[in-house]
Image (cartoon, helix red, strand yellow):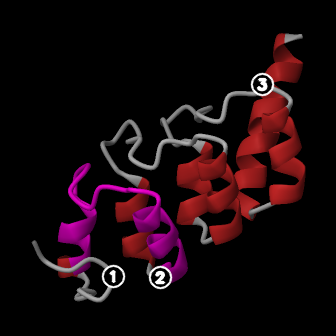
Amino acid sequence: MQRRAIALAQQMMDMARRGDTEKLMPLLDAGIPVEMADTSGNSLLMLAAYNGHPGTVRALIERGADVNRLNDRGQSPLAGVVFKGEDEVVQVLLEAGADPDAGTPTARATAQMFERPDLIPPA
């Protein structure tokens, strides 16, 4: 039973990375926690955001995913997508209330470092 649960969790992490919203959302709707995370503390939202899947990010937010949840390294989903240059995902997260000053480094600092004030303007 435990092996099957671990395998399902790994499959869900992969679904988030691939942006496989159609397969992932029914599992969450059936009761699997939206805040599930991998062994590094990367939530489903973090994985979907970092891999550039705005539709999956929106669907996770609609199901209660915390847009400011930090992984075990203190990184926020917003800072990760600023680093990756995922403009549309940045907008989805900001519209959902993501804090540009959360985590280390912050999304604001990351935008300044990569000269992207269009994504997150300086304070």
Tell me if I can see residue 53 in this picture. no
> Mark 2 vs mark 3: which is more N-terminal?
3
In the image, what residue occupies the spot 75% across and 62% down? 18
Residue 44 lies in the magenta-colored region: no
How many numbered marks appear? 3
Is residue 18 shown above or below 91? above
Percent from the top left, x then y, of residue 31? 79, 25
Which disc is residue 6 wearing?
A: 3
The mark lying in front, picked from 1 and 3, is 1
Task: Check disc 1 and give the amino acid type.
Answer: Leu
Of 57 and 14, the residue lying toward us: 57
The residue where tag 2 is placed is 87
Is residue 55 shown above or below 76? below
Check contact, mark 2 vs mark 3: CB within 8 A: no
In the image, what residue occupies the spot 76% across and 27% down? 32
Of 65 and 47, the residue lying toward us: 65
Q: Which region is colored magenta?
A: 86-111
In the image, what residue occupies the spot 85% across and 37% down? 27
Check contact, mark 2 vs mark 1: CB within 8 A: yes
Task: Check disc 3 and give the amino acid type.
Answer: Ile
Q: Quadrant of the C terminus?
A: bottom left
Which disc is residue 119 wearing?
A: 1
Q: Residues within 10 Å of mark 1 (few under 14, many from 20)?
A: many
Q: Quadrant of the N terminus?
A: top right
Residue at the far top in the pictured view? 1
> Mark 1 vs mark 3: which is more N-terminal?
3
Q: CA distance from mark 1 to mark 3?
A: 37 Å
Is residue 53 shown above or below 105? below
